[in-house]
Amino acid sequence: MSFEFRAAPASVLASMLSAGLMLTVAGCGHLAPLGPYAPAAAPPPSQLRSPIVLQAMRVQPPAPAGGCPARFTMLSVPGNPGECARPVGTPVTITSAAVSAVSSFQPRNPSGQVMPGPPIYQIMITLPPADVAAATAVVTTAYDSRGGVDFSVAGRTWALPMVFKPFRSQQVSVALPSKNQALQLHRLLVSSA
């Protein structure tokens, strides 16, 4: 599972993957800026069926005996058995965005070779310009606390990527390990009109 903000819309995942910016699939993932890319025409933002909540989190692995330290909660994230996390800063609620259809790709290593294993399923979310500053503040808070960003929809955490560098972005990419999970998240975000 992975999650990332993008500096510009991108439709060419192979470029991202061959550049070595692919996020970890079997773990928390990483949050990283991407680019430069040729902008793809994103549909205009529309009201989301369920809002997206972005929250900076301090993250640490569970204790060897299991469980989390005081003030930390165990989060279950698709593709990850669990992380201990606690909120840092103010969450941001996104109520409208442009949401792509579910697509799939085969992860590649930094040299561009296809990695063995199942495909990854991705949803691209383009935030309205008015929400970019607030989302950037969450990313910066996560970076400052050496933590991650909790990406939640309908009360469930779908991604908890670590932030290794602060940046500003308008596009979010959420990648999930199964088509079923990606379709479920898509249904939560987009009304079937």
Image (cartoon, rainbow, N blue to C red):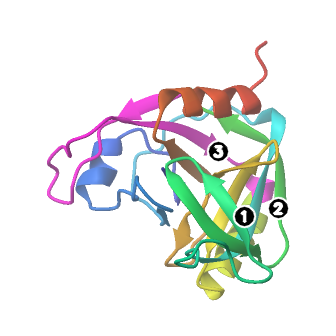
Inspect the image, locate mark 2, and give the three-letter code of the amino acid beneath it. Val
Along the polypeptide, which appears first: circle 3 or circle 1?
Answer: 3
Residue at (78%, 83%) from the top-left corner? Answer: 70
Decide which of 76, 40 is in the foreground and name it. Answer: 76
Answer whether residue 113 is magenta in the image. yes
Identify the magenta region.
Answer: 102-131
What is the secondary structure assignment of the residue under circle 2?
A: strand
Across and down, in percent, residue 107 comes to: 29, 45
Q: Tell me the residue at 59%/35% (across/down).
A: 42
In the rendering, which numbered label is found on residue 126? 3
Q: Residue at x 82, y 61 (%)?
A: 92
Query: Between marks 2 and 3, how big is the CA–CA gap?
Result: 15 Å
Looking at the image, tell me whether mark 2 or mark 3 is earlier in sequence order: 2
Mark 1 neighbour class, 10 Å CA radius: few under 14, some 14 to 19, many 20 or more: many
> Picture coordinates of residue 75 (x, y %)?
68, 60
Which residue: 35% across, 41% down? 12
For the residues bearing labels 2 and 1, Cβ distance under 8 angstroms: yes
The residue carrying mark 1 is 135
Question: Where does the image place residue 64, in percent across and percent down from the top left?
Answer: 52, 78
With 187 as the anchor, is 108 left or right in this view?
A: left
Name the residue type under label 1. Answer: Ala
Is 157 colored magenta in this rendering? no
Q: Is residue 75 left or right of residue 153?
A: left
**Residue with the mark numbered 2:** 92
Determine the CA span between mark 3 and mark 1. Answer: 12 Å
C-alpha separation, residue under disc 2 versus residue under disc 1: 7 Å
